[in-house]
Every structure is written in C-alpha cells, then in structure tokens.
Image: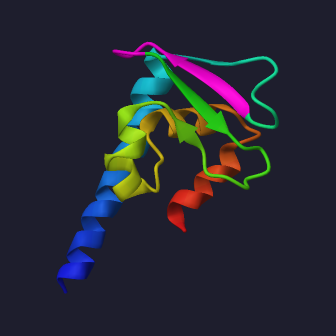
Amino acid sequence: MSQDYEEYFHQDARDDRFLRAARTVLKNYSISQRQGGAGSKALFDVQGGSQDYVVEIDPSWQESPQCSCPDASKGAMVQNRGYCKHIIAVLLKDEHFRYQLLETFL
C-alpha cells in the first residue's frame, strides 16, 4: 500500500514539473537552438532563470535528453527520469521533439 502512495506523489511531482515548464519556462525564458550541434545531438540554450542551461536532445531517441541544470541529475532523476523543467520546455516548444515527452509516462 505505501508503494502505491509513493507512486502517487511521484505522479504529482511530474505533473507539477509539466505545469511549471509550460507556464514559467515557455513564458519567461528564451529557448534557442544552436546551429551545428554536437554531432548528431540538438543543443538548446535556455536563458532567463537564475542561470543559463544547455539542453541536449538526441533526435534518434537513442539517449535520454540531458540538461546542465542541477535538478536534472538530482530530484528530476528520481521523480521524472531526469526530465527537468528545462528539458520539458524544450520538448514542448520544438514540434520535432515533442514525441519524446511520452518517455515520462512509460
């Protein structure tokens, strides 16, 4: 029973992360794709918060998206498979990568 209870809170954390990304990051931050990313990866600069971060997306979906923010390797890693609000915002903004949001539900 406690396992189900813990899973419920992970779901709430993920939902909150989606809302913050959609509301705050997309509205107040600047997201721009770098030209000629690292090899086959697409690189995005996310600016507007307390620090600027870089989000790396693999178009082939062979690797999970990465972000240089601390949350991507800490809280988001535990609760959302590493999908921090910056990654979610980049995926929401770019129609070519939106499908990768499905990973958070699997």
Q: In the image shown, does 56 or 93 lie closer to the viewer? A: 56
Q: What residue occupies the far bottom of the structure in this picture?
A: 1
- Give above or below for 1 relative to 63: below
Query: Which quarter of the picture shows residue 70?
Result: top left
| Residue 106 drawn above or below residue 46 | below
Q: Residue at x 75, y 29 (%)?
A: 38
Residue at 36 percent across and 39 percent down: it is: 71
Most foreground residue, 34 or 23: 34
Left or right, 88 with respect to 57, comes to left
The C terminus lies in which quarter of the figure?
bottom right
In reply to whether residue 47 is colored magenta, the answer given is yes
Residue 54 appears at what percent x and percent y? 55, 25
| Most common secondary structure along the magenta stretch | strand
| Relative vertical location of residue 35 with respect to residue 93 in this rendering, above or below | above
* Residues rendered magenta in the picture: 42-51
**Position of residue 47 measured from the top left corner of the image (x, y, whole percent):** 49, 14
Give the residue displayed 79% in from the left and 17% down from the top.
35
The image position of residue 85, as x and y in percent, is 44, 37
Q: Is residue 82 left or right of residue 10?
A: right
At a point 42% along the width and 41% down the height, the residue shown is 72
The percent position of residue 67, horizontal first and vertical second, equals: 51, 35
